[in-house]
Image (cartoon, helix red, strand yellow):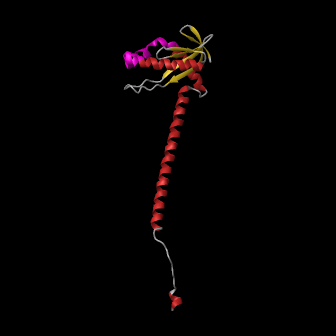
Amino acid sequence: MAFYDVDGEKRDIVGIGKMMIDTKSVSWNIPHLHFLVSRNSSYFEATCLEFGLISTGNTQEESAEHLIEHTIYHIGAVINNGRGFEELKEVALNEFMNGYWGAYRHIEFCLAETKQDLSHEIESRITRALQELFDKKVKEIITSMVKTAADEAIREYEKMSAFKINSVRYRSLEAAA
């Protein structure tokens, strides 16, 4: 992407991302977490903006994967050994990552200018997934309704076909007179 001045240090930021982590074992949620990926001379570094966690890797993707693992481990440790939600919130609200946040927001706005921002991309994926789920459910309901109607029609036909026509005779009364 570009070089950004982050707290007096030039960083070659090559990507941004968001993590959505569900915490099924507790009664609260973790807001979406944001990260930057920067290129150093021989490795990539991913930084979680809310918690200041840093992970490295040989590729952008590897550094992001390591950061996700690191973040999940960190959240688990805070839940099990720390003060839980209050500790996570306290760290996230600390202003020590403001330089990183400025770079993140700038990149997100640059991406938004060409409709490539993460927020809308994620929302579009969610909307598409919900639409696909809705379409699937509607098809299932219609299929079920049609099957039910077809089964009912077959049952009615079977009732009617229980009567057999053995013979039909017709005689015109005029012809008989």
Report if residue 87 lies within the magenta region.
Answer: yes
At a point 50% along the width and 50% down the height, the residue shown is 143
At a point 48% along the width and 61% down the height, the residue shown is 154
Residue 30: x and y, percent?
43, 23
Magenta region, residue range? 77-99
Occupied quadrant, residue 111: top right
As drawn, 160 above or below 100: below
Occupied quadrant, residue 79: top left
Residue 72: x and y, percent?
46, 20
As drawn, 67 above or below 158: above
| Near-viewer residue (10 or 77) | 77
At a point 53% along the width and 40% down the height, the residue shown is 132
Report if residue 117 lies within the magenta region.
Answer: no
| Near-viewer residue (104 or 142) | 142
| Main secondary structure found in the magenta portion | helix
Residue 137: x and y, percent?
49, 44
Residue 89: in sight, yes or no? no
Query: Is residue 106 toward the left or the right of residue 78 in the image?
Result: right
